[in-house]
Amino acid sequence: MWARLKSSLRKSELLDGAGADATGTQAGGYSSDTSVRVAVRARPLVAKERASGAKSCILTEEGRGRVTVGQDRVFTFDHVFGAAAKQEQVYRHCVQPLVEGCFAGYNATVFAYGQTGSGKTHTMGTSGEVAGAEEEEQGITPRVIRQLFEGIEAQQENRHCLVRIMFLEIHNEEVKDLLHPDTPARSIAIRETSDGQIIIAGAQDVPAESQQEAIRLLEIGSLSRATGSTLMNEQSSRSHAIFSLVLEQQPPDGSPGDLVTAKFHLVDLAGSERAKKTGAAGKQLKESVGINAGLLALGNVISALGDPKKRPSHVPYRDSKLTRLLQDSLGGNSRTLMVACVTTADMYLEESLNTLKYANRARDIKNKPKINRERAGLTQGIQGDMQQLQVQLVQRQLAEPGLALSPALLYGDLTPWAGDSIMLGMLIDVANGKGMRELYLGVLN
């Protein structure tokens, strides 16, 4: 069985550029060599800013995709939305094509970046109660969920679909499972498979059979997220949050066809902060340092990928948990949209200018999106083999309680490990009672 399991990985198909026309253009207007798309959203002045005498210092030209800061700093982006732009407008122009691409098998990522209080969480729609919010106020994430399940319903006679959800946060450089908050952060690890895919060992995804169930999971995770009040933002996110949906499509039972899989990551980054403006002290100051360190690492990755002179060199993905989790999304197998959120208040001109410079560099990153497709019968065989492997791991654990194998290995989905030949070999050795203690230390952590 183990020989078949190892060899089956080589036979599965990851189709590069499948579905492209003769010019290399794919569904949704994306090419096979796709740059990271960037949208800029400017929020209006709030009452506190108007009361302090702040003036608008940003001019947006939506039709031309231009943003002018101050008198003469001009930037051009893929999409620009002014202070009057509606949530639906942002979604329809920027995100709707990405969801359509998921049904074709393309991974997608949307991440919001900007200073604290610039409207990122509002834009992403990952705060508080979602189900009770007015539809026009709903952000990107609940709209993705709605479109995804509407698409599933429209093709239910032709395809069997499964949606799995994972909701993580990075707080003080620790990865936490927001849907299973009792899971210790030390038991969650970021792994890379032999084919470059990033998987999260120790965190658990949850199946969602309906739009309502997916929204409930979003709300549960959002309420568990670390937040706090600062001078710049009464409800400041103190962590980076990653809400991930996995869509699996396969033919109805007994029908020939392939398994098509797509991942959609929705990332609400904590805002960059300056302690003298936020008034952060003590615990919040420590959080600010962690937030800014992660964003600095992300900036270094963007610089390395976006600079043609640096592109062949080392990309520092391992400098932070955030950049490790976004490795697929920046320079990898994903269609990626960055939403740069800025405030129009002149008191934050420097912060807004830095955000736009950051976003401008991101436009130069080249991704390589691919259709993720595997032979259905082959995949079912892999799943069966991995289930049998898991049974043997449980039997070994019962026989030797001192092993203390991770619950994720004993009760979670082991199928992703089939793509990592090194880890797969370690698991097989442990299941067969072979190998030294050092061999399976990597499996435990």
Image (cartoon, rainbow, N blue to C red):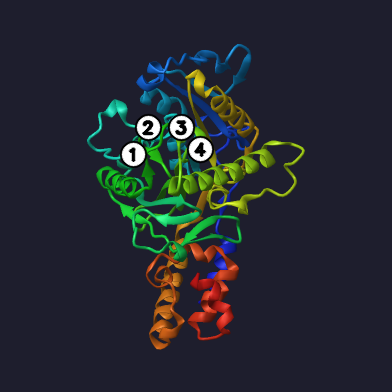
Location of mark 3 (residue): 97
Residue 211 picture location, percent across and down: 28, 43
Which amino acid, mark 3? Pro
Disc 1 to disc 2: CB gap under 8 Å: yes
Task: Determine which of the numbered discs, if any, sits on residue 275 in the image.
Answer: 4
Instruction: Please tell me which residue is depicted at 63% across the width and 39% down the height of the picture.
Output: 302
Indicate the secondary structure of the residue bearing disc 2: helix
Residue 440, by quadrant, is: bottom right
Disc 1 to disc 4: CB gap under 8 Å: no
Disc 1 to disc 3: CB gap under 8 Å: no
Which amino acid, mark 1? Ser
Chain-order first, disc 1 or disc 2: 2
Indicate the secondary structure of the residue bearing disc 1: loop
Up-down: is 271 above or below 421? above
Chain-order first, disc 1 or disc 4: 1
Which of the two residues, 278 or 213, is positioned nearer the viewer here? 278
Chain-order first, disc 1 or disc 3: 3
Q: State the CA–CA distance, disc 1 to disc 3.
A: 24 Å
In the image, farthest residue toward the bottom: 399
Location of mark 1 (residue): 127
Indicate the secondary structure of the residue bearing disc 3: helix
Up-down: is 269 above or below 138? below
